[in-house]
């Protein structure tokens, strides 16, 4: 099962024995569209390596509200589904397959055991954690400081009313100018909206898919 | 300089050579109260190990609003002041000494170099990162899901515990910054608290009058 070599950049730096332990304990799975692959604190299934498909990683509040933290795509590694592996992780996320998704799974205990001996693996895993931490910091920054999510939602609704249609023929650059923001920020937030099913993006236009959802978001700025 | 052994749990698991590299490059510093020890993207000073005092780690938005992410105390290790060490960290924090603070500093490049060879060090650093990630996730949960009144109540109680008294010498502006909110919101809520007999307000300070009442309010978020 030397496929792991293709997905785990540190694999070739492990000893043959460490490689064997990982390979022998890796199993292949397929999740159906909409399937909850990992459910918060209820399980700790292990490290997931995406072969094909898409995972959505989200948190759920006590009141049942959820927020998407980030998405994982082909070749991405899902670490927080094995959060029991890290003693210091004190929050839970859930993972949903957004489409039919094939993935490899390495049990948390196996991954942890090898990682404790292998510096390249521990360092790579640290980088993965740092990347996800960065995703969450970006999201928090946008929501807290810029209210960029609600401002963008409000702007799209207002434009749609003015134009009398759900399709807005505007570049991201133009939207950014209206909001006093940067194009990159608007593009990233629009992609986030798209992944949440709020809008559909195509070349030179943004189409509103879920007006109610956008309105809810727009009104949150008035909290 | 074998004091590092007392502060870094992985130290004894390093080779004598690795220990020597760390020790020879560690320097002792003292920050004055209010001093900005690390300033966002402007520097990457290294790993800081607190000997005595308190650090406040915060982010700053483009508009100059700040929010406290977490605090560090004696024996804590400040990792994000060496964020250049991790390629995947794509956000900046600043670090302020809340009182006179003594700390050891290990340059980011030195720490990184040893960590790349030493599994125990890489694993411990991953745990540190996971702990800070957890702090931020907790904060995001507070902000996104919790009601403002209970957040303010929780904040006042926490500050009172930290400062060891019922009188908090803080402006509404400063409280708002800590909560990622606006001064007007905080002032209005504090006046409401005063009318409910929970606090007494005077110029530049807030005094807790009814700790039990505040605690009840703070715990309402747990509904």
Image (cartoon, coloured by chain):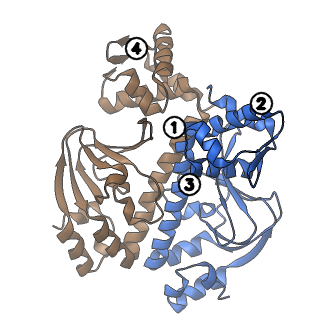
Chain colours: A blue, B brown
Q: Chain of mark 1?
A: A
Q: Give the label, 3 or 2, closer to the camera.
A: 2
- Residue shown at the point (51%, 29%) measured from the top left: B151
Q: Across the whole image, how many numbered discs are drawn on residues? A: 4
N-terminal label among 1 and 2: 1
Disc 3 element:
helix
N-terminal label among 3 and 1: 3
Q: Is residue B142 visible?
A: no
- Residue shown at the point (37%, 53%) measured from the top left: B41
| Disc marking residue B209 | 4
Q: Give the label, 3 or 4, closer to the camera.
A: 3
Q: Estimate the x, y position of residue B96 in percent, counting from the top left.
A: 29, 42
Is label 3 in contact with label 1 (beta carbons under 8 Å)?
no
Q: How far apart, in angstroms, are the residues tagged by discs 1 and 2?
A: 27 Å
Q: Give the label, 3 or 1, closer to the camera.
A: 1
Q: Estimate the x, y position of residue B215 in percent, counting from the top left.
A: 49, 24
Q: Estimate the x, y position of residue B3 in percent, counting from the top left.
A: 19, 63
Q: Is residue A52 left or right of residue B9?
A: right
């Amino acid at each position: 099962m030397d496929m792991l070599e293709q997905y785990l950049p540190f694999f070739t730096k492990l000893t043959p024995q460490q490689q064997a332990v990982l390979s022998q304990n890796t199993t292949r799975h397929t999740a159906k569209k909409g399937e909850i692959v990992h459910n918060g604190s209820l399980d700790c299934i292990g490290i997931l390596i995406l072969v094909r498909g898409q995972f959505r990683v989200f948190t759920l509040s006590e009141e049942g509200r959820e927020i998407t933290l980030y998405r994982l795509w082909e070749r991405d590694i899902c670490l927080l589904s094995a959060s029991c592996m890290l003693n210091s992780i004190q929050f839970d996320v859930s993972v949903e397959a957004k489409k039919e998704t094939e993935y490899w799974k390495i049990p948390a205990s196996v991954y942890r055991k090898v990682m404790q001996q292998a510096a390249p693996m521990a360092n790579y895993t640290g980088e993965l954690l740092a990347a996800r931490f960065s995703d969450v910091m970006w999201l928090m920054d946008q929501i807290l400081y810029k209210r960029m999510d609600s401002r963008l939602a409000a702007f799209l609704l207002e434009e749609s009313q003015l134009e009398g249609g759900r399709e807005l023929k505007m570049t991201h650059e133009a939207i950014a100018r209206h909001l006093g923001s940067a194009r990159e920020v608007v593009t990233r937030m629009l992609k986030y909206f798209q992944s949440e099913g709020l809008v559909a993006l195509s070349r030179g236009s943004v189409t509103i898919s879920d007006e109610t959802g956008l309105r809810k978001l727009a009104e949150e700025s008035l909290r």
